[in-house]
Amino acid sequence: MVKPIVPGRPVRGSKTGRPIMLLLDLLGRRWVLRLIWELREEPRRFRALQAATGASPTIVNSRLAELRAAKLIELDEASGYRLTALGSELLDLFLPLHVWSEKWARRL
Amino acid sequence: MVKPIVPGRPVRGSKTGRPIMLLLDLLGRRWVLRLIWELREEPRRFRALQAATGASPTIVNSRLAELRAAKLIELDEASGYRLTALGSELLDLFLPLHVWSEKWARRL
DNA sequence: CGGTACGCTACATAAAATGTAGTAACGGAG
DNA sequence: CTCCGTTACTACATTTTATGTAGCGTACCG
């Protein structure tokens, strides 16, 4: 695990602990964006996320713990990991990326 | 440098090379989101970006090269690194994060 | 009891990032 | 011309982070 995200506490690259900096640090950790993305439609279990991303179990576990600490995802025993209300809001901000990414790829 | 992003070519965690996967890989690299963020208002020079982020020059250089290859930023001799039209579009998708992050931090 | 799936962990290896120092090119001042 | 500052960028040893593989402990199904 890298570091828990705590408001007001400095993160890598920012001593102020401003929310946007906390968020950019968290989202910039490897696999974090991808994990959120994989949960966009339905809850998925630990092993499913591992298989979907191809990341090592060690890091999947670390990231899931960090995302849980950030209250963006939660573990529901019955269905698996799923986005919280907060996590869904964040995902909604990211959804336009999907469309935009295709336009972007065409210009590369 | 990690890997250049090329449409149709696999990236870490995806063999398909789908644009959204390329994008999530690129944006998930450390300092990438932060660098784009730092360029949101005006062009900045290499050293300014280094100072603003606190990242090592090695990695700043790598990430800037990757972002240039992805046509999200460009180097203007007169003013420094700045977002391309494509980069600005991407940033626009990210701007709502700023507001949202404060709400998020309050709930942590 | 055997088999399966679950979240999760240990640990050795490999990859990525850091910190420090330095290069080479340019322009201006003395 | 030499000295000085600024520019982008690089070399390289050290530290941090991620990978790959194996396995744990629990629960359920048969």
Image (tube, coloured by chain):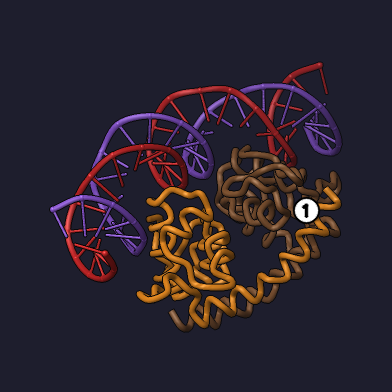
Chain colours: A orange, B brown, C purple, D red
Q: Out of D5 and B91, give the one closest to the viewer.
A: B91
Instruction: Report the quarter where the C terminus of chain B lies.
Output: bottom left
* Residue indicated by mark 1: B72
Image location (x, y in percent) of residue A37: 59, 65
Residue at image point 62% right, 58% down: B34
Query: In terms of image quadrants, where is residue B44?
Result: bottom right
Q: Is residue B80 left or right of residue B50?
A: right
Q: Chain letter for mark 1, please.
A: B
Residue at image point 79% right, 57% down: B83
Image location (x, y in percent) of residue C7: 34, 64
Q: Please indicate, yes or no, whether residue B80 appears anywhere in the rendered image.
A: no
Image location (x, y in percent) of residue A23: 54, 68
Q: Out of D12 and A37, give the one closest to the viewer.
A: A37
Element under label 1?
Answer: loop
Give the class, few, some or many, for how many residues have Cα within 10 Å of label 1's Cα (few <14, many ≥20).
many
Residue at image point 43% right, 48% down: A56
Q: Is residue A11 left or right of residue A27?
A: left
Residue B96 vertical placement versus A14 (above, below): below
Q: Please indicate, yes or no, whether residue A68 appears anywhere in the rendered image.
A: yes
Query: In terms of image quadrants, where is residue A1?
Result: bottom left
Q: Is residue A63 left or right of residue C23?
A: left
Instruction: Report the quarter where the N terminus of chain B lies.
Output: top right
Residue at image point 86% right, 47% down: B78
Q: Amino acid at mark 1?
A: Leu
Image location (x, y in percent) of residue B38: 68, 60
Q: Is residue A29 left or right of residue B23?
A: left
- Counting labels gives 1
